[in-house]
Image (cartoon, grey):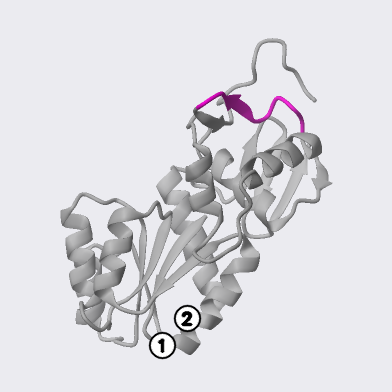
Amino acid sequence: MRVLLVEDDAALAAGVRAALRPEGYAVDWLDDGLAALGALRGEPYDVAVLDLGLPRLDGLEVLRRLRAAGSTMPVLALTARDATADRIAGLDAGADDYLIKPFDVDELKARLRALLRRRDGRPRPLIEHRGVRLDPAAQSVHLHGQPVSLSRREFALLHELLAQPGRVLTREQLEGLVYGWGEELESNAVEVHIHHLRRKLFPGLIRTLRGIGYAIDKEAGPGEGAQ
């Protein structure tokens, strides 16, 4: 899952990034509203964590312009303003949820998971599909009840594909969702992760559409039973 963190407090931003990355998030960080608006319009983010008190362009205005452009991407607003009127203003501007500083990073993680579940139309936190069970909160994967050990990148890539079965994601899209700015990326990284996932789970789980990308089918293919 790729997150844009917009926060002008560098120490707070560093703490949030350090907390989210082990959870499988690729976190990009910006510290002003104008740059954030440009990134949100041009990059494929799953969710944004947006401080409302930003230099150059206020977070509320970023939200208003983002929603006016038709974006439905989930946005979690951060602010030190705890008055009811301020919370109402943030929600009316387009925020999906609101977190008041100072906050516990575990609550931030839980709220992000809830936003992503709602985006994907999943009321339950677990993703279960063709014998695979992925738990975003526990960062665990089981196949027919047996635990499967995955790297952070493998987990993130599997999560992206499982969250919307039937959707085809190109290699470039997967790279953008799994790797943040400045992270080292080898040319065949996605193919290597896909190979490892097929080996650790089962070959027919992830389908390759040559020249297009990868997908996890909504239903098992003909003759494909329990693995």
Residue 216 at what x, y percent from top left?
A: 59, 30
Residue 196 x %, y %: 76, 41
What's the residue at 41%, 85% (across, down)?
101
Q: Residue at x 76, y 44 (%)?
A: 142
Expressed as whole percent of the image width and height from the top left, the position of residue 203 reads 74, 27
- The disc label shown at residue 13, or none: 2
Which segment did they paint magenta? Answer: 202-211
Front in this rendered view, residue 123 or 53: 53
Dominant SS of magenta comes to loop
Q: Compared to 171, does 207 lie above or below?
A: above
Disc sitting over residue 9 in the figure: 1
Q: Amino acid at mark 1?
A: Asp
> Is residue 214 inside the magenta stretch?
no
Q: For the point 36% across and 84% down, which residue is it?
A: 8
Q: Tell me the quarter of the picture where residue 145 sits.
A: top right
Residues under numbered marks 1 and 2 in contact, where contact means CB atoms less than 8 Å apart? yes
Report if residue 62 is visible in the image.
yes
Crowd class of label 2 (few under 14; some 14 to 19; many from 20; radius 10 Å): some
